[in-house]
Image (cartoon, grey):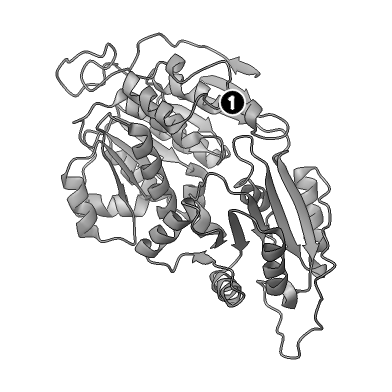
Amino acid sequence: MDTLFMGDDRKDGGRRGGRGGRSGGGEGGGKGRGRSRKPRDKGADKEPERVRTVSEPEGGWSQESFELDKTFAELGLKKEVVDAIDKLGFKHPTKIQAELIPLAMTGVDILGQAKTGTGKTAAFGLPLLHMIQKGDSMIAIILAPTRELAVQIKQDIEELSGETGIKVCAIYGGQSINVQAEQLRKGPEIIVGTPGRVLDMIDRGFLNLHDIEFAVLDEVDRMLDIGFRDDIRKILGHCPEDRQTIFVSATFTDEIEKLARKFMHEPTKLEVSSGALTVDLVQQAYVTVEPWDKRRMLAHVLTHEEPALTIVFCRMKRTVDSVVRYLERKDIEAHAIHGDLSQSKRNQVMSKFRSGKLSVLVASDLASRGIDVEGITHVVNYDLPEDPDIYVHRIGRTARAGRKGHAWSLVTPAQGSLLTEIELLVNAEIPARTYDDFEPRERPEDWKDEPTG
């Protein structure tokens, strides 16, 4: 691992333990963080003063991406947290975890670059579980762009919390405000939420952030893309200035840097430099098919290959529903995930998928954000995305933690140039796959071309 760290002024101790005496794990009173910081100069226009670079392997994150010479205990995490990690079967941190966890425990603000699939939730979640004590009501807030990701983060941190007794509450649109208000009244230590609902709960008087000591923004680039900039500014404005702030983003943009300069105090930038954008362990292929035959081809592929756990990606919600109905007529059990589903239905579907009782999930891109399920064996691009970067994000759902995975794309004859763009981005020629036992049909007389293919 190549590491570049300039101006490393970290010290042992720092901000470890609980509220009031965190630096030494003492029982001292007060809600202070145990460190003093100069007031933030809101007019400052400074770049982060420290830069740490973690190089991503050329083939992407695989088994070699783990720090096999380190254990979680060696990162300085307290025993209850390490015990919970051991029970979950995790032995070694990923490289981003090995870098971010001890850095976060010193209390510095961090501008961290991390992609989905690198273990980023544990990278910021474990330091929180280490530093927070049971009873530190509403001391940490984590913002996420979508309700799916918010729920996923809550579930992950609850699993990692073990016997710490730390409670996590998720607040997001699509669920009763009164139900979530009651959860907040119970005083959870960690709040996870989407910006819109968090701001709504503040405005209604159900939530105040006066005691927040930790603020984490996950997928901050996505939140800005969706249009949450003003909400983020308002939420951080409700938090004490003397807090630790962590931004996690797949990319660093000028807008993110500007936000960091306003709301962070001399942040350390933790960068992951990418080599090739795809994962070596993903076997990619494409199947040429006429648009009117795509549903038949998808059913043929799923029947022929018998994948264990599959996500099928479509561009539009109506395509998702159409594909699910067709697969069900072909006796292939599949469920949809898109924005029109109620939260209870989404939770039911995801629970079934995670447990392996459901093998095929059909999803739109936006609704799939936050779906981080272990053991996904196949990704199918029913609709080839217009943006090649989305293709990379989709296929990154498989081939996690050293496992092999498969990514197939249904490509119409008119999409040759788009396929070429994807190949240029991933720096690889994607091979064609044919099925001799599949009989193409002539174009139906009532067929109408649609943007969904």
User: Which residue is depicted at the point 17% across and 52% down?
Assistant: 182
Q: Position of residue 371 (x, y in %)?
A: 50, 50
User: Which residue is depicted at the point 58% across and 49% down?
Assistant: 376
State whether residue 219 is above or below residue 177.
above
Is any atom of residue 17 visible in this view? yes
- Callout count: 1
User: What residue does disc 1 label?
Assistant: 66
Q: In the depicted view, which residue is nearer to us: 102 or 84?
A: 84
Q: In the depicted view, which residue is nearer to us: 7 or 58?
A: 58
Q: Quadrant of the N terminus?
A: top right
State whether residue 99 is above or below residue 222.
above
Q: Quadrant of the C terminus?
A: bottom right
The amino acid beneath tag 1 is Phe
Q: Position of residue 147 (x, y in %)?
A: 40, 54
Q: In the depicted view, which residue is nearer to us: 45 or 86?
A: 86
User: Which residue is depicted at the point 40% across and 32% down?
Assistant: 125
Is any atom of residue 206 visible in this view? no
User: Which residue is depicted at the point 36% across and 43% down?
Assistant: 154
State whether residue 299 is above or below residue 96.
below
Report which quarter residue 410 is drawn in.
bottom right
State whether residue 102 is above or below residue 369.
above
Relative to residue 92, is residue 304 drawn left or right?
Answer: right
Relative to residue 434, is residue 292 drawn left or right?
Answer: left
